[in-house]
Amino acid sequence: MFGMLGKDRVKVTSSGALPTEEVLNNGVRGQPDINAIATRKDGGVDALVWNYHDDDLPATPAPIDLVIDGLPTAVPRGLIEHFRIDSNHSNSFAAWKAMGSPQSPSSAQYQQLQDAGQLQLLNSPSWVRIQDGAVHLQFELPRHGLSLVRITWQ
């Protein structure tokens, strides 16, 4: 997903981000680190959003309220693509565990693992209205989840 980002980074603010110094010194043990990186390129913006915690324990998904602004005001709509990696999407390790963690997967199991590891869209691409140069999206992001939200226009 990181390789899908554009070259020009843009400023991101997150009310759920932990200070870098705290993460380096103490890890992510209390509240999760919910943050993002965003980039722009001709005709598009990408936002990579994560929900990270050191402990691999069940947790309630984080509500994400993503506002992408600074878009062209003359463009009426954009195409949204939402890619996801989590325990249910784009995750061959979860598929391997679900099949009983075979040490020597069969050919069919190997194919299932390859398929499960491909980057998946969370839902079908859809058009969204750009209002006053901004798009407002809301979704839930599971713990240890990673979303790449891409908006493109012509």
Image: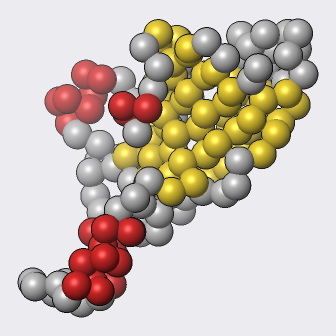
Q: Residue at x 85, y 10 (%)?
A: 73
Q: In the rendered image, is residue 4 in sight?
A: yes
Q: Residue at x 74, y 23 (%)?
A: 153
In this rendering, the answer to whether 133 lies above or below 53 is above
In this rendering, the answer to whether 65 lies above or below 9 is below
Colouring of the image: secondary structure
In this rendering, the answer to whether 30 lies above or below 10 is below
Q: Quadrant of residue 108?
A: bottom left
The percent coordinates of residue 15 (x first, y second) are 56, 29
The number of callouts visible is: 0
In this rendering, the answer to whether 124 lies above or below 12 is below
- Left or right of residue 92, residue 46 in this image: right
Q: Quadrant of residue 143?
A: bottom left
The image quadrant where one finds the N terminus is top left
Q: Residue at x 88, y 9 (%)?
A: 74
The image quadrant where one finds the C terminus is top right
Q: Residue furthest front?
A: 107
The percent coordinates of residue 141 (x first, y second) are 55, 52
Q: In the rendered image, is residue 31 in sight?
A: no
The percent coordinates of residue 129 (x first, y second) are 87, 31
The percent coordinates of residue 115 (x first, y second) are 38, 69
- Left or right of residue 12, residue 79 in this image: right
- Left or right of residue 125, residue 28 in this image: left
